[in-house]
Image (tube, rainbow, N blue to C red):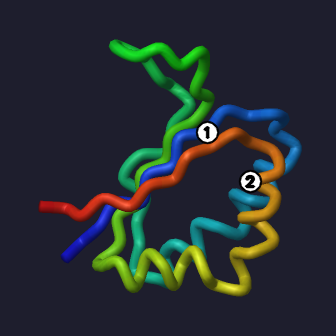
Amino acid sequence: MAVYLIAEMTWKNTDWLPAYLGVVPALVEKHGGRYVVQTGEIERLEGTRDKTDGIVVLEFPDRDAAMAFLDDPAYQEQKAARLENTVSETILVPVK
């Protein structure tokens, strides 16, 4: 069953983004994933969060592929940079 990996982020800074974007899209593709949404253009309609700078939605063929992406050794440096430089939440949702 396909899954969506969804990340909502607020930037602490954006210095890490060029390196991240230079590596991660190829890793997503390597694991059978594709970008569904990648934007900083967010219009909050409900909720109380102060700020969201970016939302990314990735679609993977299944949970195993999504986890292989997240656990890929080539992703770990970029993941660490994202975690250090954002306040973020990442969730995995099955596509029904």
Identify whether 35 is placed above or below 61.
above
Looking at the picture, which amino acid does disc 1 mark? Met
Q: Which residue is mark 2?
A: 82
Give the image location of residue 71, x and y in percent.
61, 81
Give the image location of residue 43, x and y in percent.
43, 17
Q: Nearer the viewer, residue 52 or 48?
A: 48
* Quarter that holds the N terminus: bottom left
Element marked by disc 2: helix
Q: Which residue is mark 1?
A: 9
Task: Give the CA distance from mark 2 to mark 1.
Answer: 9 Å
Looking at the picture, which amino acid does disc 2 mark? Arg
In the orientation shown, which residue stands out farthest toward the front?
48
* Quarter that holds the C terminus: bottom left
Quarter of image, res 20: bottom right
Residue at left 57%, top 74%? 70
Residue at left 44%, top 55%? 91
Identify whether 34 is placed above or below 62.
above
Residue at left 24%, top 64%? 94
Give the image location of residue 55, x and y in percent.
50, 40
Residue at left 38%, top 61%? 92
- Dot 1, crowdedness within 10 Å: few (<14), some or many (≥20)? many
Q: Nearer the viewer, residue 39 or 12?
A: 12
Mark 2–mark 1 CB contact (< 8 Å): yes
